[in-house]
Amino acid sequence: MEARGIIPRSELERLALASLPGVAVLVFDPELRITGCCGSVREAHGSDPEDLLGRLLNDVLSPQSYRRVAHNCRIALRGQTTIFDVRSQRSAEHILELKTAPLRGDHGEVLGVIAVSRDVTAERSAQITLRDCERRYRLLVEESSDVISRQTVDGTYLWVSPSVEKLLARTPSELVGRSIEEFLHPNDRDCLRRLLTSLAEGSADLRHTHRMRHQEGGWLWVETVLRGLRDPRTGQIVEIIGAGRDVTAAVLAENALARSNADLGQFAAIASHDLCEPLLLMRAYADLLADEAADRLMAADRNRLEVISRNATKMQGLIDTLLTYAAVDRKTVGHERADMTRVVDDTLALLEARIAASGATVRRGPLVPVSGDARLLGALLQNLLSNAMKFCDRPPVIDISCEKAPCGWFLVVSDNGIGIPAEEVHRIFGMFARVEDAVYPGLGLGLATSQRIAELHGGTIEVESEVGVGSTFKVLLTTKRG
Ligand code: ADP
């Protein structure tokens, strides 16, 4: 092969790559003069081969491209091969990947440079998009306040997001290579092992709450969602991705609530046994005395006995209502399909006498089945209907219906009663909260009990009201467990 002279084109085409689309081959002598070219020369370099042959590289390239190409050609002349990108002379948007290698003679001596160029515009733009995408996801993962981690199937950390420093006061590198078990509370380790096994056996996402040791001592409650990452070829779980967040405050609040519920339950037990019995006796003896000694008693004494009996009855009512409130706890809530038409029918039947006495008109809109405890939903409805009749200074007109909510249904009860002053609305769901205790009888526990029932169903209760016009209570019943 003659490197000083012009190499015949046909010879080069035979040598390599001319038939590959987008690929061009150029040969330079040691002065960087183009001594041969073939392949997609026009597409790649914007000139016909005849116009390039015999010209010096710095005549045909932009100064910037020339510097790059010349630098790599010099490396090739020293016997090494390099690969690099340059902008095409045809158009700056096109990117060429150039491979420059020494062109050797029959005895291995370097005669010049052979450069193979390939159009990689589409490839590079796909790589940039991919890199951008990766950067965005990385940012998302790294900036997330949740701790994201990659773990082996047996729970060894492979990667942990920087937010772990905020959670456990440890750097990611302190965790990588160590098992999650080392940081778990001993009582939670078995549970985690079971979860990992079940993930490996093909379970989908798993959510669990466990205690993790904080670097400075103490335990944090962390809720974690684990997901198995499968090898697309074998279907085997090869890694586990975890996302964990600190739920200590919520767990402590729930525990405090459980304790206070237990206290309430205990109080209820004491109230039912120890308070009711003396109360019954008190009332019975007061009534007995009023009957048997009626002719020996002064009118004022008879009045006093009546006050004793009336207050004993009132106290009995208070205890009964408190017991009802205390009886509504998480354990007692069933989550079946509750047919609201049935619930409304049963509640209206229970209130039949009061409805008749108050002259109330009760109208029903559409009612749907919801997920919940029919017995407790009936108690809630009974409270709302009783109030609608009680807090009313004209014949009550009450509407009951179900309305679609974004994540479930609203049970809606509206009335034409006296309404609730705006400044009182926020406190009427509290225990013993009343607005008008002088005029209307009551203990202020009905709405507190209703709120408890709604919350145990994972829902809420709210009211819109206008004094003198009426009130609308909306109970949100979600489909998830409370
Ligand atoms: P109670 O009925 O024993 O007073 P509740 O907890 O059921 O207790 O209600 C608390 C307070 O909210 C009531 O005392 C009353 O002032 C107000 N309220 C409740 N329901 C209505 C209603 N439908 N219309 C007007 N006020 C109401």
Image (cartoon, helix red, strand yellow):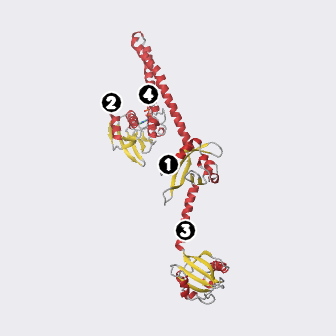
Q: Which mark is residue 198?
A: 1
Q: Are marks 2 and 4 in contact (CB under 8 Å)?
A: no
Q: Residue at x 53, y 71 (%)?
A: 123
Q: Which mark is residue 353?
A: 2
Quadrant hosting ligand 1: top left
Q: Nearer the viewer, residue 263 or 348?
A: 263
Of the image marks 2 and 1, the number of the one nearer the N terminus: 1
Q: Nearer the viewer, mark 3 or mark 4?
A: 3
Of the image marks 2 and 4, the number of the one nearer the N terminus: 4
User: Label 4 amino acid?
Assistant: Asp
Kindly report the distance in space between the C-alpha atoms of the residues bearing marks 3 and 1: 37 Å
Q: Circle 2 sits in a helix, a strand or a loop, which is it?
A: helix
Q: Which mark is residue 320?
A: 4
Mark 2 burial class by Cα count in 10 Å: few <14, some 14-19, many 20+: few
123 to 401, vertically: above or below? below
User: Label 3 amino acid?
Assistant: Gln
Mark 4 burial class by Cα count in 10 Å: few <14, some 14-19, many 20+: some
Of the image marks 3 and 2, the number of the one nearer the N terminus: 3
Kindly report the distance in space between the C-alpha atoms of the residues bearing marks 1 and 4: 48 Å
User: Label 1 amino acid?
Assistant: Ser
Of the image marks 3 and 1, the number of the one nearer the N terminus: 3
Q: Nearer the viewer, residue 415 or 65?
A: 65
